[in-house]
Structures are given as C-alpha cells and as structure tokens.
Image: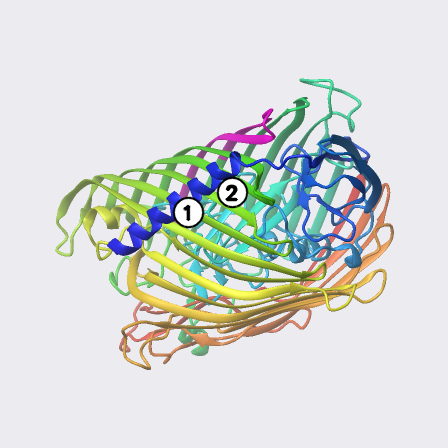
Amino acid sequence: MKQIVTATWAWWGFLVGLCLLAHGSRAQGLATLRGTVADSLSGQPLVGVSVGLQGQPGGTATDALGNFRLIGLAPGTYLVRVGALGYRSVAQAVTVGASETRTVPFAIAASALNLSEVTVSQPRDPNQSLAAISQIDKVLRPVNSAQDLLRLVPGLFIAQHAGGGKAEQIFLRGFDVDHGTDFAVSVDGLPVNMVSHAHGQGYADFHFVIPETVEQLKVYKGPYTARFGNFATAGAGEFSTKTRLDASQVKLEVGRFDTRRALVMLDLLGNGNHHLLSKKPESAYVAAEYNFTNAYFEQKQHFKRFNGLAKYTGQLSDRTSLTLLGSHFTSSWDASGQIPESAVRDGVITRYGSIDPSEGGNTDRTNASVVLTTGLPSDAVIRQQLYYSRYNFNLFSNFTFFLNDEVNGDEINQTDARNLYGYTGTYDRDDRLGARNLHTTFGLGTRIDDTDLTLRRAVRRTITDTITAGRVQERNFNAYLDETLALTDRLTLNAAVRADVFVFDFRGNYTDEEGSRQPLNGRKTRARVSPKLNLYYQVSPAVQLFARSGFGFHSNDARGVVRGTVNGNALPRAIGYEAGSTFKPLPGMVVNAALWALHLEDELVYVGDVAIVESAGRTRRYGADLSVRYQLTRFLFADVDLNYNHGRLVGVAEGENFIPLAPRFTSVGGLTLKNPQGFSASLRYRHLDSRAANEDNSIRARGYFLLDGVLSYTRPRYQIGATAENLLNVDWNEAQFANPSRLRGQTEPVQEQLHFTPGTPFFFKLNASVFF
C-alpha cells in the first residue's frame, strides 16, 4: 500500500509539472481561431458541440459558455465544421494569417436525427466514450417515468420492490448495486446517492426528476474519470435538465390500475422575448407533475407523488452565465413487499398478494442550486456550484414476517432526516505543450451530510422499540487534476489523479445482541487517492480505440465505520481496466464494444432481515459490452445492447463463491420509427437471465424476457400517444432475494428461499399533450 501511495503522489507531481510546463509553452507565428456556437432559435450558447477542420484529425468542442478555440494553426484557409446530434451540421471557410487571432460565430438549427452525422470522437471529454450512444438513446428510447431515465444507461437494469416509492434496485456490469452503492448518479450537479442512508449505503432515489425536463445524459462506465469519487466504481451517470423549453406543455395520462398523471411545463420568457437579469439570451421555466396509481397488487398501493421544478439560465455578460434551480418532491405509498415463493406455491396468497399489508412509507426532497460560469481573459473557464438539499425518508418494511417475533412480527421502521450541503468548482483551460494541445481541468469540492437516523421495530406502523438512533455528520473534501494531452494527431493521453478525505462522525446508541442499550459515539478520518490513466487512438473519423484504467472506491456506512464492523475498511478500493472501440462500420451505424475487468476490495451486501449492510469481502468481475445503433431508413432505427458479466467472491471455496444476484447476461433492444412531425412507434424488449441468489447457487433468481410498445402522433400543437408494458402478459419476478422467513402460525422448519416482488402484468396507458 505504501508503494501505491508513493507512486500516486509521484503521478500527481508529474501532472502538476506537465500543467506548469504547458502554461509556459507558446508556439510563435501560429494562428488562433476562436468562436461561439449558439442555438439559432433561442440564441443560447451550446455546450459540447464538436468543432473540427475538414481533412484534419482532432478538433475541439465548445466549453461551458459555448466558446471554442483552435490554436497552433499554420496560416491558410480552413473549412471549419460544426455539428451536434439533433442539430444540422454547418461548414464555413475561414482564412487566418500568421500570428492572427480570428473570431467566428456559428448558429446551428435543430434537425431530425441522422446517424451519418454522429461523430465517435470526444475531443473535450474523451472518457465519455458512450457519448454517441447516449445521445442517440435520449432521442430514440421512450421515457415514460423517472425510473425509465436510468434505463437509458446501456446495460443498466432496475427493479422496484416497495410500491413504487422507494429507489430502484440497480444492476450494472455484474453488480447488484442495491440502491446505488456502486453507481454514482447526479442531476444538474446535485448528487443523488446518499451516504450513510437509513436504508442502504449510496441510496439513490431518482424520483424527484421530471422525465420531460431531462435534456442530456452522460454515461461513464468504470472508475476511469477523476470528476467522480464516491460510489463511481461500476460507473456514473450525469443527467442535465433543459436550459429552455421549445414550447409550453400540458400533458395528461391515464392507464390501468387507477393510474393517472398530469404534467405542466411553462416557458416564462417566451424564447427570449422578455428578460429578467440581463439583455442577453435568457430562459426560465417551471414544471410540475402529479402521479397516482394503485398498481397491480391486491393490496392497493395508494401511490402519490408530486414534483415541482423552476430553472433560470442566462448570460449576464459575454463571459459570465448564471443558472438557478429549485425543486421539490414528495411521495407516499403502501407496499406489498417481497413475498416467499412457497406462500404462492402453497396457495396461501396469489402472486399479487401480501403477507404484511402495513408496509410502505413517505419521502420528500427539496433542492436549491446556483451555478456561476465565468470565462477568464486567459481563455480559462471557472465553473462554481453551490447546492443544498433537505431530505426526509420514512419506511416501514418486513422482510422476514414472523421469523424473530412470532407474535408481533418483524416489521422495522427506518427514518432519515437530512441536510445536504455542497460546493464544486472546476478550472478548465486549453494550452499548448510544445506543438501539442493540452486540456487541463482542476477540480475542488466538498460535501457535508448532516442527518438523523433511526432503525426501530414496529407493529402495523406503530413503533415499539428502537434498535439504533443517532446523528451522522459525514464530510467529504476532494480535489483532482485531469490532463488530456494530444501526443500525436491521432493519439490522446488522459491522465488524472483524485484525492478524497472523509470524516465519519456518529453520535447515538444501538441495541446489542443481548438487548442492552449501548452508546455509540466516535469520529474517524480516512483518505483515498485514486489515479487514472486512459489512452485514445483515432484511427479515422469513424473509428476510435481506447484503453482505460483507474482506481475508484465506495464509502461504507458511518455507523459501521465508527463501530469497526466493516473490517476496518471505510473506503474499500476498486481497480478497473478495459479496452475497446467506438466505431462506425457504416455511415448510419454506431457501435461501442469493450472488454473490461473490475476488482473490488470489499463488497457490500444488503441483509434484509435486519436491514443492514454487511461486508462480503473481495470480489472480481470481468465482462464484455456491445452496443449497436443503426439507422435503417430515414425514420427507422434499430438498437441492441448485449452485456456479459462474470463475477466471483475472492478467497472463497469454488462453488460457494457466487456473488448473490449479480447478473450474468443482460440485453435490451428494439425498433423505433421516429418521425418528428407525425407518427412514431417503438417495439422494445428487455432480457435479464437467471442467476445465483445466494453464494452456493442453490437458490436461483429467475430471469425474464419482456416486450414493451409505444405509439405517438405528434403535430406542432399537440401529441397523442399510448404505452404498453409486458405485451405478452408473462409472469415475471422483478426484485428477488434469498433469505429465511416465517409465516404466522408456521410449524414447518424455516429455510432460506427465494422472495420476490412480482413484475408488472400487461399495462396500458394513454396520454395527450398540448403545446403552446
């Protein structure tokens, strides 16, 4: 470990030296081409637009202010090409002289999706190798709910097991991520994962997002990107909401099982016709949605959710932009929970029945965020964000029914009342290292979680006893340096290092195995340094190869860290590496393929009967990912994701080393007809294979294959549509766990068995929207 830390700090020193050397290196007599790219309709600057020179490799992309810069150009005339998915590409001839700095503005218009215009290179953010795939999916794949947004991550599966109100269980790259332990999620820079959460480490409740407001998704698989720290082992997903609305909208939905939804989105400034804080391009809108359903269970779920969002984006000056965001979310529900297979087999209940009808809960979250982006005279950009979240969670669960208490039952109550504060700042700059382009990003951040947690026993939602109660104050301080250097016209090196410091503090008490009350007070400080090294080779404009490696980590629960029940491992390390390619074998086809491996120092496993997270020791995984997107005709598209994963516990006897619930093979795909001003349709499938539910594979979680369909008809002023899930009406298990349980009055010996939440039967929903 000492050698690793020493080498890591040497790596940090190398990156700092590289950065300082670059800032002192200037080429003489060469020209610079500057420019801005904006939306032709709203005038708003566009971020991440590709900018390149015809016939030359490399290029750049617009920064957070919509600006770009091409430096080190020999005098001459160039054909500058500007393009982004969903926009019509433009090209313009530009002549530059020796030592000249030329500025050229570009305005591009929205257009129908055309895969022949998709580029496979990511000059500003090379680690986003799935960018082309994600951008295509956001246009093509139907999104009907907040949880559908997570399904936009290639290879990611979700499962709900508590009436729709809890965060989904996540599966990705051979991980049962539980509710988010090994997949980091953020929305507009707001972290979604909750550290030391009452229900599970990394708990990521994504339901506060209104799906119609989401504009972009960035997917990063593996621990290769320095911007992400805690929980970003299997990967990370960054969601961004719209900066403006194309039109105001009212939408109504009705469906089976008493399902109802209403949505309102209002443009407040009329596409630039009015102003609030400046006379430059601005936008502001509000959005709200209300959901209700009783779902398909015999025990009505009474699920209710409200979401509200207000967002302002504006240019205060040529070099400064401001984003303000506020949102509120509240939800309540009843749940049927997981039921034992034996109870269904023996006719005690049906597939949609319930053992404990008092399960359920309520939760809410309020967010506030301000982002100030400033361009400096030195062509650097500073982005600073302050955010705050107020979060509450109250859940009643019963995983084992009458196993421990044959009279009153085993129901538990978990509560979490949290204040979350944070700051992130980044400094981005393009430079030259000799004759080569160098992009530098320095990041600095902090996050403070101040939360009151309880774990209590209950009987039909009446509290009877407290198991654990106390206050967690968990602080994270982090910094990273990320350098992207063009070693040649085709070969790019990305090297980075990240440092994190955590302070775990818990003040409270717990009940020991003898039932005695014990104080639990303590503070521990731990640190983790995570180097990254990635290579990208642009074979041609249509083929990019990559080889990536990096260290990552996920934190453990503060209560376990303070008590010393997590093997002394507060920040278990992960190391991952992969090789692959993003390429276009045909003009209308985009393919991403990767072979990968990931080693984790300490696996966290959720234990349902006591609602805690335990350490299962070291694990290793390897696998292969393949994603294909193909435009068959102007309006017809096909897509498929194939993901193979193999994972095992390390240091455990063969045959007893299965990782419970770790997926082995998953696949999604479908056909989509996309006519932006008329009829659109999509037929899609989802497949998750059967897999081990416990360490010796004696109990199997059952796989499934589902078909879903979406129809819509769109005109400038309105849209009507229909959604159907599980078209074949198959019986399938959504969430599944292996654990022992006892029914009331049960006399047979208790055995570990499969418990499951039944998946949705055939479900049909209609919707209608008006645009104005």
The quarter of the image holding the C terminus is top right
Residue 360, label in figure: none
- What amino acid does circle 1 point to? Val
Which image quadrant: the N terminus?
Answer: bottom left
Numbered circle sitting on residue 497? 1
> Looking at the rendering, which quadrant does residue 95 occupy?
top right
Residue at 75% from the left image edge and 31% from the top image edge:
102
The span shown in magenta is: 366-395
**Amino acid type for the residue under numbered disc 2:** Ser
Q: Image point 27% across, 73% down: which residue?
A: 651
Where residue 662 appears, x then y in whole percent? Answer: 44, 69
Q: Is residue 59 magenta?
A: no
Q: Is residue 37 above or below residue 146?
A: above
Question: According to the image, what is the colour scheme of the structure?
Answer: rainbow
Q: Nearer the viewer, residue 85 or 76?
A: 76
The residue under label 2 is 331
The answer to whether 445 appears left or right of 492 in the picture is left
Residue 702 appears at what percent x and percent y?
49, 75
Query: In the displayed structure, would residue 463 be above or below residue 45?
Result: below
Tally of numbered discs: 2
Instruction: Kindly tell me whether residue 272 is visible in this rendering.
Output: yes
Local SS, label 2: strand
Q: Is residue 166 visible?
A: no
Q: Main secondary structure of the magenta part?
A: strand
Q: Is residue 724 above or below residue 721?
A: below
Q: Is residue 474 above or below residue 516?
A: above
Q: Is residue 191 left or right of residue 196?
A: right
Contact flag, marks 2 and 1 (Cβ < 8 Å): no
Assess disc 2: are there few (<14), some (14-19) or many (≥20) residues with their C-alpha within 10 Å of its C-alpha: many
